[in-house]
Amino acid sequence: MAVIIDGKAVSDRIKSEIALENKKLMDDIGVMPGLAVIIVGNDSASKIYVSNKIKACEKVGFYSEKIQLSEKISQKELVARIEELNNRVDIDGILVQLPLPKHISEKVVLGKIDPRKDVDCFSPFNVGRITINDYRFLPCTPAGVMELLKETGVELAGKNCVVIGRSNIVGKPMAMMLINESATVTVCHSKTVNLPEITSKADILISAVGKPKFVTADMVKDGAIVIDVGINHDENGKLCGDVDFNAVEPKAGYITPVPGGVGPMTIAMLMKNTIMAAKANAILNVKSAGKTKAAKSKSDK
Ligand code: NAD
C-alpha cells in the first residue's frame, strides 16, 4: 500500500503561508501583488483554469485582473496588450492561458512577457535560467511536483528518475529541475522504445503524457514514488490521471491521486511566483523612482 501524497493539503498549507506573507508585505511596505490573466477565446477548460487562478488570488489577498479577449484578436493586438501590462506598476505577474488560437504563435507571445513578470516561467529567458540552475521563477507544474517530492522526505540526489513526456511546460523543465537536485534523469516520450523496461527501473516515476491508464502496474518498480501529472477523463467522463491508480497504488511506495495531487500544486506555485515577482518589482520600482528623482534634481540645477 502506497502513501498517498495529498496535494490539496500541501497546496492549502502553501497558500496559507503566502496569505500571511502577503499581509506582511502590505503592512510593511504597502505592496499588493497583482496578477493579470489573459484568456483568448472561449475554451471551456481554459475558462475553468483561469477562474481557479483568480479565485486563488482572492484567497491569498492578491489583486487580480482577468482579461478576456476575442478568439479573433490578432497577434499584434495581443502583443500590444501584453506590452501595456509589462508597463503597469500594479501588475507583477502576467499569465497567458494556453492554448492560443492557431493563428497566434505561442512562442512569439510568451517571448513578449517581461521576464520579471513571467510568473508561468514559459519565456525563453526564464527557461534558460533553469538550465543553468540560476533562476528567479520555476514553472508552476514541475515546481509543484518538486514540492510534493519534498513531502516524502526522500533524498533526490542519486535517485533514478524517469519522466514520461518532453513538453516545454512539464516534461523538459521537470527533468532539468531533477538534474539540478542531482538525480539521474531519463526522459521518455512518444518515440521511446521499450518504455516499460525503462520505467520499471525508476525510483521516481513522473508521468506527463495525457492518456488515461497509461502507466500500468508492470511499468512500476516496487516501492517507487509515482507522480501523476496527467489530467484526463476516463471512459465514464470522470477526471483521472495517466496512472492506473487502483493497479499501481498497491505496488508504489508513494503516489499522487488525480484529482487532489499535482493539480492543486500548480496554482499554489503560481501564487508563490506572483508574490516573489511583487517583492522583486517593489525593489525595482523604488530604485527607478530614486533614479527619476535624482535625474530630475540634476536637471533642476
Ligand atoms: P503534451 O501533449 O505537450 O506532451 C505529452 C508528452 O507525452 C509528449 O512529450 C509526448 O512525447 C509524450 N507521449 C505521448 N505518447 C506517448 C507514449 N506512447 N509513450 C511515451 N510518451 C508519450 O502535454 P503536456 O502539456 O506536457 O501535459 C501532459 C499531461 O499533463 C496532460 O494530461 C495535461 O493535461 C497535464 N497537465 C497537468 C497540469 C497540472 O496542473 N496538473 C499542468 C500541465 C499539464
Image (cartoon, helix red, strand yellow):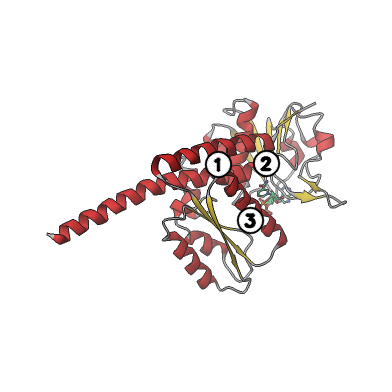
Could you tell me the amino acid type at mark 2?
A: Val
Which residue is at 47% across, 61% downward?
85
Residue 126 position in % (x across, y down): 48, 50
Q: Is residue 273 visible?
A: yes
Instruction: Classify the position of the N terminus by image quarter.
Output: top right
Residue 267 position in % (x across, y down): 61, 46
Q: Is residue 222 above or below residue 301?
A: above
Residue 190 position in % (x across, y down): 71, 51
Mark sitting on residue 262:
2
Which residue is at 64% across, 37% downward?
12
Ranked by sequence position, the earlier of labels 1 and 3 is: 3
Instruction: Classify the position of the C terminus by image quarter.
Output: bottom left
The answer for how far apart the CA atoms under marks 3 and 2 are is 17 Å
Q: Can you identify the residue that label 3 sits on?
A: 50
Q: Is residue 250 above or below residue 296?
A: above
Between disc 1 and disc 3, the foreground one is: 3
Which residue is at 72% across, 46% downward?
230
Could you tell me the amino acid type at mark 1?
A: Met
User: Which class describes the residues within 10 Å of circle 3: few (<14), some (14-19), or many (20+)?
Assistant: many
Ranked by sequence position, the earlier of labels 3 and 2 is: 3
